[in-house]
Amino acid sequence: MCGIVGYVGKRSAQDVLLDGLEKLEYRGYDSAGVALTQRDGIRVVKSKGRLSTLRSKLEELALPQSGCGIGHTRWATHGEPSEINAHPHCTDDKSVVLVHNGIIENYQELKAKLLRSGYTFYSQTDTEVAVKLVDYYYKKTGTPLEAISRAMLRIRGSYAFGAIFKDYPGKLFAARKDSPLIIGKSENGSLIASDVPAILDQTRRVYYIGNLEIAELSRDEIHF
Ligand code: GLU
């Protein structure tokens, strides 16, 4: 289980995510990635190995500044350390993008069901099953909160999730079960993180998400 950081606010999400993930490096990881909201959708950038490799990749890409995104450092439990298995994971059209800490115990059963519903899988991770399950319910219900809560009812195991949706560019969603996840509120935005050191530079106002609770964050508001 490794690191999650998410941010929505006035600052550059890329900077906040990379700085936050750096603070979680001490926990160990094998790959890293970020997803950033852009004008034309969500951009996902990942790399195997050190966070500095991801940072260089992002510097080379020089994406337009984004005010919303999620980042992850992975400690592989399902599938080898690789760029494909690195988080964030997403749907083919990148309408739903998600990072995950923990282990989904019934991922094989859920994957079989999603394959029957026409989903394709590219990684060996349990996490890709989670994002596609959320998407399945999102297509059915049309709302992120309903989709996440329905997926939570189906998933067995432990998880901390951070998610963004293409149709909701200024919003960040978080949920957890038996895996730590906190929320921070600063003057310039809202944050999620798997551990306090990731956001201490930004704020000391920290809230703990309850087990099986879902949070919806925007720049100025947080709803549980
Ligand atoms: N089970 C997930 C994976 O293997 C998440 C690992 C983690 O917590 O970093 O990708």
Image (cartoon, rainbow, N blue to C red):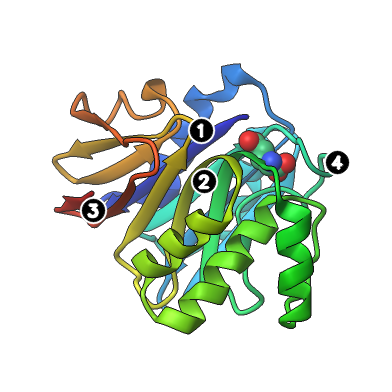
Residue 42 in the figure: left or right of residue 142: right
Under circle 1, the secondary element is: helix
Of circles 3 and 4, which is in front?
Answer: 4
Residue at position x 25%, y 45% in the image: 190
- Dot 4 corresponds to which residue? 80
Residue in the picture at 73% in, 77% down: 119
Asked where in the image residue 115 lies, by quadrant, the reply is bottom right
Q: Is residue 121 above or below residue 130?
A: below
The answer to which of marks 2 and 4 sits earlier in the sequence is 2
- The answer to whether the residue labelled 4 contacts the one labelled 1, judged by CB atoms less than 8 Å apart, is no
Element type where label 2 sits in the image? strand
User: Where's residue 22, x and y in %?
Assistant: 52, 28
Q: Mark 2 and 4 residues: CB-CB less than 8 Å, in contact? A: no
Which amino acid, mark 1?
Leu
Whole-angstrom CA distance, mark 2 to mark 1, is: 7 Å
Q: Amino acid at mark 4?
A: Glu
